[in-house]
Amino acid sequence: MRILLCDDHPIVIMSLAELFIAHGHDVVATAAHPEEIRELVALHHPDVCVSDLLFDGEQDTAAALSAIREVAKSTDVVVVSGAADASQRQAAMAAGAVAVVSKAAPPAELVALVEGRSDVCTVVTRPAGPNPYFLTRREKQVLQSLIDGDSTERMAARLGMRHATARSHVQSVLLKLGVHSRTAAVSVGVRQGLAVLSA
């Protein structure tokens, strides 16, 4: 399946690309702003466009999603949003989205939506509880540092710990989240609301 990704946070784009590629799909292009979607869809004719809904809190993403139908009627749109209210979700569906799902949704659910194996069309809520992975306060700080893009050296300096200690905490976070890479940890952390993307 050919997929176009659109989000203004590079680390989200990277995480989504890794997720879909791991499931055998082809990420044909990425965009940082909804204004780019129409041109990229016309150029690549993806099967699915996976897009955020809110960009800098102001841009009319629904209009950009509507424009997809003008250039590639066969391209489905799946909206993945971290903060969409009911009216915004309705606007996305009215603009042609086949589904609107939360960034907190499990990766498997997002893949199922993109592959057309799920009939869910509304936002998926986060798991119950504020800390479903039982991260310690320090591990949450380490996860936030990963999301901020810090190297191990910068993380150690930022959090006031030795390099070896920082590395140990990173391994503990990966273990608790059940992932094997920092990128995957960031993806889970953002989707599950364990830390936040910097503005």
Image (tube, helix red, strand yellow):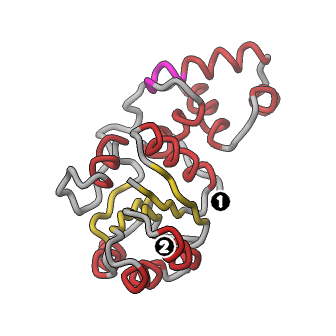
Mark 2 Cα within 10 Å, few/some/many (few <14, many 20+)? Answer: many
Give the labeled residue for mark 1: 199
Q: Is the magenta region chiefly helix, strand or loop?
A: helix
Q: Amino acid at mark 2?
A: Val
Q: Residue at x 61, y 57 (%)?
A: 9
Which segment did they paint magenta? 173-178
Amino acid type, label 1: Ala
Residue 133 lies left or right of residue 86; in this view the side is right
Question: Looking at the picture, how far across and down is residue 144, in whole percent?
Answer: 62, 38
Q: Is residue 12 above or below residue 139?
A: below
Is residue 174 covered in magenta? yes
Compared with 19, 142 (above or below) is above
Q: Residue 31 versus residue 135: which sits nearer the camera?
A: 31
Q: Do tag 2 and tag 1 residues touch (Cβ < 8 Å)?
A: no
Asked if residue 150 is among those painted magenta in the image, a careful observer would answer no
Residue at 32% of width from left, 72% of height from top?
A: 74
Query: Residue 149: x, y in percent?
Result: 70, 41
Q: Is residue 13 left or right of residue 91?
A: right
| Residue 96 tag number | none
Rate crowding at label 1 as few (under 14), some (14 to 19) or many (20 or more) other CA atoms within 10 Å. Answer: few
Q: Is residue 71 above or below residue 159?
A: below
Mark 1: secondary structure? loop
Q: Position of residue 72 (x, y in %)?
A: 39, 77
State the mark number for residue 41.
2
Specify which label sits upstream in the sequence, 2 or 1: 2
The reply, left or right, for residue 134 in relation to residue 33 is: left
Q: CA distance from mark 2 to mark 1?
A: 27 Å
